[in-house]
Amino acid sequence: MQDSKISLLDKAIEQSWSKIPPLWPLSNFIAVNPLQGLEDLPFEKAMTEASIYFQQNDFPDELNTVNRQTIKWMQAFFDKGQATVAMPLRPNGLYLSLHALMQFDQELFLDNAESQQWLKSLPLDPKDVIFNILHRLNIPENEHADFLTLSLTTLPGWASYIRYLSRWSTNVNTETDHPLERDYLAIRLIFIYLLWPNALSLLDWHTSKKTLIKNSDTYNNMVIAEQKYQAALLQKLQKELNSIDSKTSSSQVQMIFCIDVRSEPFRKAIESVGSYETLGFAGFFGLPVHIEKFETSESYDSCPVLLASKSNVQEAPCDLTRIKLFKSAQKLYQSMKYTFTVPFVLAEALGVFMGAAMALKTLTPNSLSFLQKNLLNIDDQSVKTCLDIQSISFKDQCEYAETVLKMLALTKNFKNLIIFCGHGSSSENNAYSSALDCGACGAKPGGINARILAMILNSSTVREHLKLKNIDIPSETIFLGAQHNTTTDELFLYESDIVGFEKLNNLKQLKADLVLARKKNNLFRARSMGYLGKDINAAEYIKDHSQDWAQVRPEWGLAGNASFIIAPRDLTKNINLAGRSFLHSYDYKNDPEGLFLTTILTAPMIVAQWINYQYLFSTIDNVAYGSGSKITQNITGKFGVMQGNASDLMFGLPLQSVYTSDRNSYHEPVRLQVFVYAPQASLDKIVSANTLLQKLFGNGWVVLICIEPIEHSFYVLNRNFSWKKINE
């Protein structure tokens, strides 16, 4: 190809991928806005564009054939151990390996020897293949980008997974080339050329769909729901404004939770049972760390995907012998399970024991849980683990500690006990379990991050450094890590991290109050899931849900999320937010330059926006943007789900995560409304300096509301970045 042709083709390829969002694997199922590639458009126009590209299901028959072949080969190439025999030649890359193997797939040639020979003679550079096939299909040069875009959006799940692998997965250089994207386009075009020689008509098909799209009521209904929600919340907030600066706390325990909407009702429950002060912070607690777990050999970044991890932290059981034996047996069982013949022998040898376990798990899951925990001593949280944080430099430790404390406005009046509470979930037989863990920790439980920060803040040398920054932590103040189970509301304290912790005053009372808070919030969760039984039995109902391997809805996750409130806790403490709000602690008086608020708006708020849109679009169209019913799903390659055995990779949340039944939704699709207790001038400065925020606020993807702290008035940011006062 000539250089000018290469340049034009590069632009067409890049443009074709611009509409495709990333799709994370099930192991760390990060929430993402499925319309992320359309955020440069006004929200309502983006919805129309998306319906044209992503909500079509009456494809031409030839395209359906192309899709089936693409799915078949992508399953084989990207498999992560589910298949007994791995596809050969995978180290050569997607294009080169498939090019070598596809020549033997007779379904692609229909006894056409000429096509088979053509495939063998293709060049080794996928970009040359793309150009040659576009030319053979007679696609006009000015429509190359459109045709390539349609090649991706007509099988968007697999394209989104390629996008993730190419731009977001570990060790990918996002600033350089993306060969995997070219490889996939080349393979996709090969299938199209072999199975649909007249694919030029795809452009006409697309044009016809544009003319059929009509304005739906979805957007108008959404606006009405948003206005109703906003008015009700503003009314509640207004009542609290007059006393926000006069409230004091007499508590001896401060607890810092993740901003997750599931933490909000639990925080309220804890505050209601005793003298406890709670705060909110992104659940990775400002630590860009990479975790290496000994017992599972798992390795992952425990920080938002917007950040790169900086330090490796190793976690290992303090009692290695018992955990080694258990994990070795578990690993042996899994390896035998996936071989050719051993499963038959395995069934005979262990059938009686496994049958008994299955019966208990099905009929009385609590009994099996009791057996594992108390008799076999198999329980992850009962295993004492040690953390090695030496890889985090002293400079970084001091910086992390100072930043978190200042962002929380926690620089004086320290309580005797300060607990950082990460969170995770517990469920059985749940492909989407990681979607219920902490998004700020890369869809992993956040307890480790909480423990690391507590260890840093308990360090005498770190405290000496903080004194130089006017942060004087009393010697009697103890920091402790904990993990909140969002499914059962159990809060596990990592007491073994602190020598002599069991002698702490009021520890017995704290544990008793945590049990009361758990029972109180269990009732709230149970009622939201349709529980109609006695209040006293709600905790048992919730526990059964978490251990029942037939349960399609162990918890609601972040369903119902609607707002992000950046303010002191005093503003929201007495308000029933119904588990719909992300709560981030913030005091504008401690942030004169707006640096902390900038961080909150450009990191935690962005993650919350991704979550908001994953739930919103999974509700609006659960087939196109969600993943359909769990009942008919199959896991493919250990990384994604399909409907049946040969669908596109399903993109978002399952039906049961957002619907109470096939037709009745639980989640209300509304755009994220961000309430900030800070002066307009601070927000103007931040938004004017950040193009991402300008895009989100200016195109109506996120609603920004300023709560003016001086005049106690509310202002909404218009799309032209002017402010409109909201009538009280």
Image (tube, helix red, strand yellow):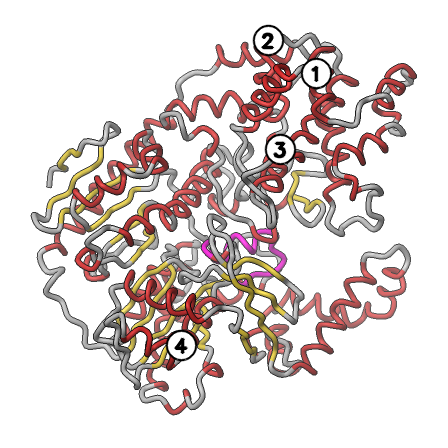
Amino acid type shown at disc 4:
Leu
Residue 141's place in the image compared with 106, above or below, is above
Which numbered mark, 4 or 1, is in the foreground of this view? Answer: 1
Judge whether residue 431 is colored magenta: yes
Q: Residues within 10 Å of mark 2 (few under 14, many from 20)?
A: few
Q: Quickly name the residue at label 2.
A: 204
Q: Quickly name the residue at label 3.
A: 159
**For residue 126, what is the image quadrant?**
top right
Amino acid type shown at disc 1:
Met
Check if mark 3's residue and mark 4's residue have beta carbons within 8 Å. Answer: no
Choose between 270 and 298: the one closer to the eye. Answer: 298
- The residue at 32%/31% (across/down) is 700
Where is residue 246 shown, x and y percent of the image? 10, 65
Q: Residues within 10 Å of mark 3 (few under 14, many from 20)?
A: many
Q: Earlier in the sequence, mark 2 or mark 3?
A: 3
Q: Earlier in the sequence, mark 1 or mark 3?
A: 1
Q: Secondary structure at mark 1?
A: loop
C-alpha span from label 3 to label 4: 43 Å
Q: Secondary structure at mark 4?
A: strand
Q: Earlier in the sequence, mark 1 or mark 2?
A: 1
Residue 419's place in the image compared with 10, above or below, is below
C-alpha span from label 4 to label 1: 63 Å
C-alpha span from label 1 to label 2: 28 Å
Choose between 103 and 599: the one closer to the eye. Answer: 599
- The residue at 89%/64% (across/down) is 345
Q: Quickly name the residue at label 4.
A: 480
Q: Secondary structure at mark 2?
A: helix
Boundaries of the magenta span: 425-440
Check if mark 4's residue and mark 1's residue have beta carbons within 8 Å. Answer: no
C-alpha span from label 2 to label 3: 22 Å
